[in-house]
Image (cartoon, rainbow, N blue to C red):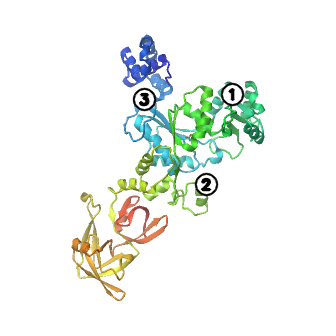
Amino acid sequence: MAGDDPKEILFLCALQNAVKHGGIPQSGAVIGMVMGAHPELRSRAKEVSAFVKEAIADVAALSPEERVKTLQTRAPVMFAALSEKHEHKKVLPDLEGAENGVVMRFAPNPSGPLHIGHARAAALNDAYVKQYGGRYNLRIEDTDPKRVDPEAYEMVIEDLKWLGLGITDTVTQSDRLHLYYEICSQLIGRGGAYVCTCDNEQFRELKNKKIACPCRAQSVETNFELWDKMLTHGFKEGEASVRIKTDLNNPDPAMRDFPAFRILDAPAHPKVIAHVYPLMNFSVVADDHLLGVTHVIRGKDHIANTRRQRYIYDHFGWKVPVYRHYGRMGIEGVVLSTSQMRLGINDGTYTGWDDIRLGTLRALARRGISPEAVRNAMLAIGIGDTDISFSWDNLYAENRKIVDPVANRYFFVHDPVTAQIEGMQPHTAHAMLHPGDAARGTRTLEFTGTVLIPKSEISPDVTMLRLKDLFNVKISWNGSIPSFTYAGDSLADARVAKAHIVQWLPAQDTIACTILTPEGEIAGACEPAVRSELGKVIQFERVGFVKIDAVKDSGVVAYYTHK
Ligand code: GLU
């Protein structure tokens, strides 16, 4: 980052200009850029101008490839601003210091697939990168081997692909342990961290009394020796840790000299052979710094971590990212706990990670919720710090906006009964595939005299029905036995008679259809043409939107999406 050194700013602006235009910039252009981006330097114009020639010469000395590389590593945001299209889609409140682009990250733990709770951080950070331009890091945080599911690496990537985010870079923390070790050594060297060999209980007692443990006063040399001993397996699990020096008088005991590294012998990590692992607060700061993260949007549950993390920034004098902490979001009606989901999958309660009773993104996908709807629902929730409960209705409303214009319409008859209709000749009926889009054409349904209609629509108090896109039917009752007669085509008559408009099927031409809902199955029959909609969301009018999940010889299986 440029910081506020005018020489560095001049060099980076000249470099960005050279990378952008492929030549050596003029002094005037560079000074103009510097003054535009750094108005605070306008009062030092003379001084700035004095350095400009030197900055341009430094850029000219680099090869074109070196220029790109240098800009990329020394000023990732300026580099990103060149390559990204700014969509300027302002949907969220402004972030301070974001005008020249941002570097943001989504940092999930690979403990299972992503669920609707993760979607908030993922979508909000994404939207800001789109709003300001910049880079979006996916950082897989797998430094706690107890919370790693080897299959989750793949699942997280697939889930994010589905969600449609603009991820530009991906890193996995277990590939970066050497970087954390290196930064830890630097911190020990600065006297900002120490190796603590106290028994945990003993440390806690002292800490609660705001008393330093004996290790805190060790010399830097001793700390280096002990750190080396940690890394070379000289200590066993629980025998040593690295602690960050914070403020022992901090009113919150959890802030006092919190741990940064620990030793774990088991379980083995699925990706690396390791003995010493960084704890989240350390690896998060190291990476936010190394990756040039400018802004962090995360939940309020991380506020205490943010406080801890600031101590590390302060020890190094690093620039702290801009943080925004959004409120808690209660999500009801689905299972979200990874351990509960895993247990249920293993014991056969759930069919898999996409079982529709779970709150995973893959379960939403299976039910026919579109990724765009999830993103829009999350943006509508926004980054406010008030605690809220997640509204499924809002998600469904967002999804309806997306599926309604595209979903073809078909007839589904729940719990069908056969009705023989007198007074009308066999003929071909036509029903529109989509009422708002005549160009899509029609389905044909052969009326042969016998139809299937939903059992629930027929009871002795019903004397007229309208078969959708067909005609009206009069029902006469002989005791409990109904008989059905053609009663004209007029929709107006049906309205006057307050006849229900029901879906129907030619009795000779149907397939079985089971709609799966979280509450259970709805069994019925549907048009055979539904077979061609595998994997798509369609609408069974009056029933709701469904996603066709499977087409079998015995019929189709659909998942209920929403009304
Ligand atoms: N991986 C952690 C989490 O998912 C850290 C995220 C963060 O720092 O925002 O909770």
Mark 2 Cα shell of 10 Å, populated few (<14), some (14-19), many (≥20): few
Q: Is residue 324 above or below residue 331?
A: above
Q: Classify 33 as above or below 393.
A: above
* Disc with the residue nearer the chain's start (3 vs 2): 3
Q: Earlier in the sequence, mark 1 or mark 3?
A: 3
Q: Position of residue 401 (x, y in %)?
A: 35, 54
> Which residue sits at x=39%, y=17%?
31
Residue 231 higher or lower than 547, as above or below = above
Question: On the image, numbered disc 1 is attached to which residue?
Answer: 188
Position in image of residue 271 (x %, y %): 62, 43
**Residue under numbered circle 2:** 339
Residues packed near mark 3 inside 10 Å, few (<14), some (14 to 19) or many (20 plus)? few
Residue drawn at x 33%, y 71% is 503
Q: Earlier in the sequence, mark 1 or mark 2?
A: 1
- Marks 1 and 2: CB-CB under 8 Å? no
Whether residue 114 is visible: no
Q: Where is residue 548 in the image (x, y as percent from the top left)?
A: 41, 62
Q: Can residue 178 be seen?
A: yes
Q: Is residue 118 left or right of residue 424?
A: right
- Which image quadrant for residue 474? bottom left
> Secondary structure under badge 2?
helix
* Amino acid beneath label 1: Ile
**Residue at the spot x=40%, y=19% of the render?**
35
* Residue corresponding to mark 3: 100
How far is mark 3 from mark 2, CA to CA?
A: 42 Å
